[in-house]
């Protein structure tokens, strides 16, 4: 008799976003005329930049011509894309990252989960609370945890609380952690990390032989020139960090799919026999075996992000979403609702008014004003009492959603 991976049975019923979609769809089925505005999942709404579209159209034509046709591409991604990323995203910021250390993939979410393939089963693992649920669920699936308790916390994971008191940045742990997930700008709270904060993590990781999984999917939304965009801007990070980045949010590739992961060649971890093994070599082996690369057409589209036209168009897109974030912050604040984030990130972390729980506020927003947010409790126990509002939507919808919320929930 075939058996299953029983670890899946430990997972909470549904992944957060499909669960929200299920509730919203049920409401929409009962109220087909309700003018629902979705500010829940962080999915982009604006069209792909023109530079990316034209590059992809040209790439389709390349595929129609024997001389320029492409079959399997390199599993790591095409060198012409990796070289531009290395030069413009990393070397231009003083990061010592080489094109061969960059792996192109179809998504940061996939890479954040897949990376566990190359690490052992006995690592101590820390996540912040609240946290992007993928980090937790993929560890549950991999059998790195026990069961969840009543608060939804899995036995075996170390939860680092982030809250208003610590500016939504976790304190450096006193115990030894092997794998640490950090996300800056933060999903869900919109918080950012200073150089000093990241330096403290890198120093901790180097002292303890730990590896930091640094999720920088939202780095393009940083507006403060003093904030680091990459962990590799921090001294010593090459020896203790893997960075995940994405074209989803800056260039609108959520439906197109393209991302990248940086694994420095100087990063090592221990084998069972105590020897130091290069992590790059394992990830390269993993990708070459389980992945055939992102399509040529999509990689050509991603390459256009680095053209002069592409850069200007992406700036416009980001400014557009950040103006939405500003409207959300200002309107809610004026209505007496406490908000965090939204200045260097496309997410606004809202303290629920009238002492409502996260899901109560979610339900009231959906039923009373037909606006969808993401309940903070869905990101972890410490997210209770908050709701995340995404700035990814049209201006018209954001303005209208804020009008409805502030009218109904004014303090
Ligand atoms: C979110 O809403 O948190 C994002 O959509 C997550 C993701 O990009 O997977």
Image: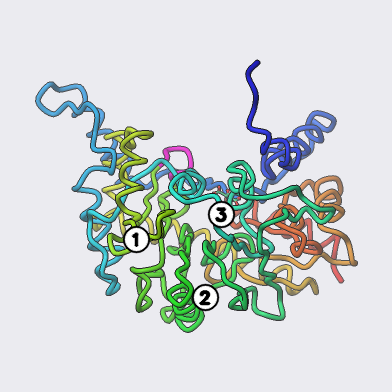
Q: Nearer the viewer, mark 2 or mark 3?
A: 3
SS category of the residue bearing label 3: loop
Q: Nearer the viewer, residue 409 or 111?
A: 111
Residue 70 showing in the rendered view: yes
The percent position of residue 19, horizontal first and vertical second, equals 73, 39
- Residue designated by label 3: 122
User: Looking at the image, how many numbered discs can be counted on the residues?
Assistant: 3
Q: Which residues are magenta?
A: 253-257
The answer to whether residue 280 is above or below residue 23 is below
* The quadrant where residue 298 appears: top left
Q: Is residue 129 magenta?
A: no
- Residue designated by label 2: 193
SS category of the residue bearing label 2: loop
- Residue designated by label 1: 276
Q: Nearer the viewer, residue 303 or 410?
A: 303
The answer to whether residue 301 is above or below residue 2 is below
The answer to whether residue 141 is above or below residue 234 is above
In the orientation shown, which residue stands out farthest toward the left?
A: 67
Q: Decide if residue 225 is on the left or right side of residue 323.
A: left
* The quadrant where residue 389 appears: bottom right
Q: How is the image coloured?
A: rainbow
Asked if the residue at tag 1 contacts the one at tag 2, i.e. Cβ–Cβ closer than 8 Å, the answer is no
The percent position of residue 94, horizontal first and vertical second, equals 27, 74
Between the residue at mark 3 and the residue at mark 1, the CA separation in whole angstroms equals 16 Å
Between the residue at mark 2 and the residue at mark 3, the CA separation in whole angstroms equals 29 Å
Q: Residue at x 65, y 23 (%)?
A: 3
The percent position of residue 181, horizontal first and vertical second, equals 54, 61
Asked if the residue at tag 1 contacts the one at tag 3, i.e. Cβ–Cβ closer than 8 Å, the answer is no
């Amino acid at each position: 008799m075939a058996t299953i991976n029983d670890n899946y049975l430990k997972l909470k019923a549904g992944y957060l976003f499909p669960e929200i979609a299920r509730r919203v769809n049920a409401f929409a089925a009962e109220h087909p005329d309700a003018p629902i505005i979705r500010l829940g999942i962080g999915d982009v709404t604006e069209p792909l930049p023109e530079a990316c579209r034209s590059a992809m159209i040209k790439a389709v034509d390349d595929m129609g011509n024997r001389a320029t046709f492409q079959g399997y591409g390199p599993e790591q991604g095409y060198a012409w894309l990796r070289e531009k990323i290395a030069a413009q995203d990393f070397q231009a910021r003083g990061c010592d990252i080489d094109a061969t250390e960059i792996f192109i993939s179809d998504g940061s979410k996939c890479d954040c989960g897949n990376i566990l393939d190359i690490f052992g089963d006995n690592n101590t693992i820390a996540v912040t609370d609240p946290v992007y649920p993928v980090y937790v669920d993929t560890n549950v699936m991999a059998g790195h945890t026990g069961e969840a308790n009543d608060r939804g916390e899995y036995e075996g994971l170390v939860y680092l609380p982030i809250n208003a008191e610590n500016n939504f940045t976790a304190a450096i742990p006193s115990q030894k952690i092997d794998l640490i997930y950090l996300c800056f700008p933060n999903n869900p709270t919109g918080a950012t990390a200073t150089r000093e904060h990241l330096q403290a993590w890198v120093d901790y990781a180097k002292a303890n032989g730990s590896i930091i999984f640094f999720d920088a999917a939202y780095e393009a939304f940083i507006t403060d020139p003093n904030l680091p965009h990459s962990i590799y801007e921090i001294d010593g990070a090459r020896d203790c960090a893997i960075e995940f980045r994405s074209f989803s949010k800056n260039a609108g590739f959520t439906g197109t799919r393209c991302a990248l992961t940086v694994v420095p060649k100087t990063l090592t971890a221990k084998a069972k026999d105590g020897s130091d093994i290069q992590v790059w070599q394992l990830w390269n082996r993993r990708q070459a075996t389980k992945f055939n690369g992102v399509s040529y057409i999509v990689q050509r589209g991603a390459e256009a992000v680095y053209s002069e036209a592409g850069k200007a168009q992406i700036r416009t897109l980001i400014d557009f979403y950040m103006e939405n974030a500003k409207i959300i912050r200002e309107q809610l604040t004026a209505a007496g609702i406490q908000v965090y984030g939204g200045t260097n990130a496309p997410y606004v972390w809202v303290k629920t008014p009238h002492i409502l729980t996260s899901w109560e506020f979610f339900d009231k927003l959906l039923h009373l004003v037909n606006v969808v947010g993401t309940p903070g409790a869905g990101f972890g126990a410490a997210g209770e009492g908050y709701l995340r509002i995404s700035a990814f939507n049209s201006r018209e919808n954001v303005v209208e959603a804020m009008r409805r919320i502030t009218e109904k929930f004014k303090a």
